[in-house]
Image (cartoon, rainbow, N blue to C red):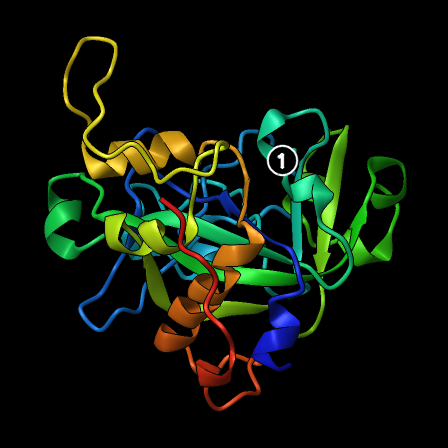
């Protein structure tokens, strides 16, 4: 797919995986590779994997805990509840659009401190379709999804990815430098770096990004060029890319 074709597709981002509020984020290695560590599963079923089944035994406190492996990148499914505000923008995606997943990751040093190094893009689905609950609960397309594998669950939708969906080899940072190029507030402004919380304490860049991305976010059309360029710079071998250079594409206005 050429870059100019990608620029016509909607792109949303959504947070997944373990964080310091629930455990220890997945590891980020010196070469930029990483391991995605899902959150724990609260309602495991007979087919729910344990962390050791996913090859994550050394990265979690208890390898025998059940993992809520969602998204899964074998048959490309992601589930979430239809009524949750966090998926409101993700529900706007259509066939051919993109849902990017990002997660907290930690270097070895930060893991020893049980801290978070930052947020990173870890993979994406090129959307085939979004399958509503009444269809998803009995569809062969969704049988590997964590919500389907629970003992009992309902009111979820399943985002189904195409075969061109991919798990990234190298994590793409979501930091102040990069988000200034492609992420905006609902009013189209840059994120409020240096803002203070209710107690008057200055928030860190990580806290500002966390606050801005608690719900799924759509990337504005004028910022898609910068977004895709950053993804391609770290992962040029992705199946979605088939262009040699973005130089022929006019870069969008970066805004204030």
If the image is split into quadrants, where does the C terminus sit?
top left
Q: Residue at x 38, y 41 (%)?
A: 18
Q: Residue at x 72, y 68 (%)?
A: 162
| Residue indicated by mark 1 | 87
Q: Is 39 above or below relative to 75?
A: above
**Residue closest to the far top:** 199
Q: Residue at x 43, y 75 (%)?
A: 232
Frontmost residue, 124 versus 177: 177
SS category of the residue bearing label 1: helix
Q: How many marks?
A: 1
Frontmost residue, 244 versus 115: 244
Residue 252 located left or right of residue 152: left
Residue 5 located left or right of residue 210: right
Q: Is 40 above or below relative to 103?
A: above
Quadrant housing residue 62: top left
Give neighbour class at mark 1: few <14, some 14-19, many 20+ (Cα, 10 Å).
many
Residue 191 located left or right of residue 163: left
**Residue 190 visible somewhere in the drawing:** yes
Q: Position of residue 100 (x, y in %)?
A: 53, 55
Frontmost residue, 62 versus 30: 30
Q: Residue at x 73, y 34 (%)?
A: 156
Q: Position of residue 93 (x, y in %)?
A: 71, 49
If the image is split into quadrants, where does the N terminus sit?
bottom right
Q: Is 163 above or below relative to 110?
A: below
Quadrant housing residue 95: bottom right
**Residue 169 visible somewhere in the drawing:** no
Q: Position of residue 220 (x, y in %)?
A: 54, 50
Q: Position of residue 136 (x, y in %)?
A: 83, 44
């Amino acid at each position: 797919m050429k870059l100019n074709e990608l620029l016509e597709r909607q792109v949303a981002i959504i947070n997944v995986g373990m964080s310091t509020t629930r455990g220890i984020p997945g590891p980020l290695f010196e070469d930029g590779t990483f391991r995605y560590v899902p959150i724990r599963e609260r309602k495991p079923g007979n087919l729910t994997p344990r962390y050791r089944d996913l090859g994550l035994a050394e990265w979690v406190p208890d390898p025998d805990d059940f993992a809520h492996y969602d998204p899964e990148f074998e048959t490309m499914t992601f589930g979430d509840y239809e009524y949750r505000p966090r998926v409101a923008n993700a529900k706007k995606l259509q066939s051919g659009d993109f849902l990017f997943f990002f997660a907290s990751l930690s270097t070895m040093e930060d893991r020893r401190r049980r801290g978070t190094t930052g947020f990173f893009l870890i993979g994406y689905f090129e959307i085939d379709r979004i399958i509503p609950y009444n269809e998803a609960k009995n569809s062969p397309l969704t049988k590997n999804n964590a919500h389907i594998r629970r003992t009992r669950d309902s009111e979820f939708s399943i985002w189904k990815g195409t075969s061109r969906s991919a798990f990234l080899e190298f994590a793409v940072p979501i930091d102040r430098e990069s988000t200034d190029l492609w992420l905006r507030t609902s009013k189209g402004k840059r994120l409020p770096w240096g803002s203070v919380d209710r107690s008057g304490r200055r928030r860190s860049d990580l806290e500002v990004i966390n606050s801005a991305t608690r719900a799924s976010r759509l990337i504005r059309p004028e910022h898609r060029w910068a977004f895709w360029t950053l993804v391609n710079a770290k992962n040029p071998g992705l199946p979605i890319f088939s262009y040699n250079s973005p130089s022929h594409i006019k870069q969008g206005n970066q805004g204030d």
